[in-house]
Image (tube, grey):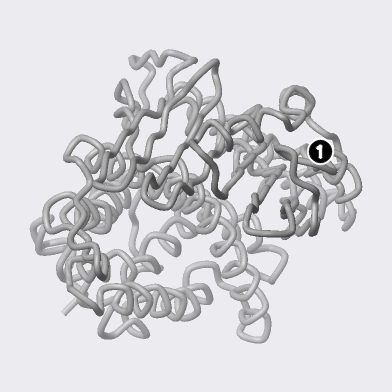
Amino acid sequence: MTSDIRQQSMWDRLFTRVQGILTSPKTEWPIIADEPVTAADIYRNYVFILAAIPAVCSFIKSSIIGISIPFAGTIRIGIVSGLSGAVVSYVLTLVGIFIMALIIDALAPRFGGTKNQVQALKTAAYAYTAYWVAGFGQIIPLIGVLVLLAGGLYSLYLLYLGLPFTMKSPPDRAVSYIALVVVCALVVGIVIAIVTGALFGGSALLQGSGATRSSEVKLDPNSPFGQLEAWTKRVEQANKDYEAAQASGDSAAQQQALERIVGMALGGGGDTKSLPPDQLRTFVPEKLAGLARSDLSVERNAVLGIQMSEAHATYSDGAAKTLNLEITDLGGTKGLMALAAWAGVEQEKQTATGYERTYKSNGQIMHEVWNQKSSTGEYTVVVGNRFMVKVSGGGPSIDTLKGAANAINLAGLEGLGQNAVPR
């Protein structure tokens, strides 16, 4: 069925490949591994098309069908906001596939595999097929989330089956290779979900056309795609540094170079770590909006050297009045937050009980949610394209939460965001 795939039309090839990878992956992966294609072919004939499914179906569900809320009826996001969010989600998915291909390629020698950027892109693109196709499930009432979950799990299984064929990893080392790639996939997915979900309820459409790179194309260096082009060059240089470290035989240098590739891929520059818990704690005041701090927790987590730190605090008057404070340091993944700033953000939604608003002011991204009926909400400000400061709780108005957030040492955080904390 798949041996003559190159003689078919583009759409026939697409449907044949999707059917093959979903229904008989064990026989399809060897065919994929042997196909003579370019990275441009994979994106143009496969990724660009299938990656649009979740974004389009999300728009249909949120802006046309609507989201049913028990006891509240059906809520629909505005057409402009829905389209903007779909575009941003789609662009970040394309970036995420490229990031995963870089990680798969960089890890291959470490597990006895063979470095090959095109094969790595094949692995990432075709393994995600199940999740993309499951994107149709978003328009199915009640069980849509379960369909998406099943698609995600099956994509992990496809990745498990494909790596030994595409990257030539020995069977006895393939499981460890797959496990580390899966961890990286989850990290990339979580970070992209944070950026998409928290900041892009609505956003301005990306300006310019950077989908095709050519010597004749001139990109504005301050535009989203101009920034993306500069980021790509940094990743390529990090990859060369890793190859040099491999040639040296120095295992410590190899580990550092590997971490730098992942750091570059996530946009943080590869040389930034998040604040240690003791330092992040200093930005959590003893009192907030006249309320005493009743609870505090601070932690830092890392995968492959990519760190994120979080501080959570609760403030209370001992009775009914409570505020919650969250400070998140994105550390080495701050470049994805910068992508949000490049794209430009603006969204406003009014409901019967309140509003939700995302906007940019004085170079910082703000997000407000307020329920007039319960007099509760949340206010988030992104500082230095790196720190997310969120205050949630109740009060007379949103101004209570804004005042509490502004009482934090935002200038100090912004200074740290502009000056990387070195490794």
Kind of residue indicated by mark 1: Phe
Residue 162 point in image, percent of width and height: 45, 75
Residue 257 point in image, percent of width and height: 77, 47
Say which quadrant the N terminus sits in: bottom left
Instruction: Please tell me which residue is depicted at 41% across the width and 25% down the height of the picture.
Output: 344
- Nearest the viewer among 187 and 314 is 314
Instruction: Please tell me which residue is depicted at 69% across the width and 34% down the height of the picture.
Output: 269
Residue 349 point in image, percent of width and height: 28, 39
**Above or below — where is 365 with respect to 218?**
below
Residue 327 in sight: yes
Q: Quadrant of residue 154?
A: bottom left
- Nearest the viewer among 85 and 218 is 85
- Nearest the viewer among 75 and 153 is 75
**Above or below — where is 228 with respect to 83?**
above
Say which quadrant the C terminus sits in: top right
Q: Is residue 423 left or right of residue 171?
A: right
Residue 258 in sight: no
Instruction: Please tell me which residue is depicted at 24% across the width and 62% down the height of the picture.
Output: 72
Label 1, secondary structure: give it: loop
Residue underneath mark 1: 283
Residue 333 point in image, percent of width and height: 64, 43
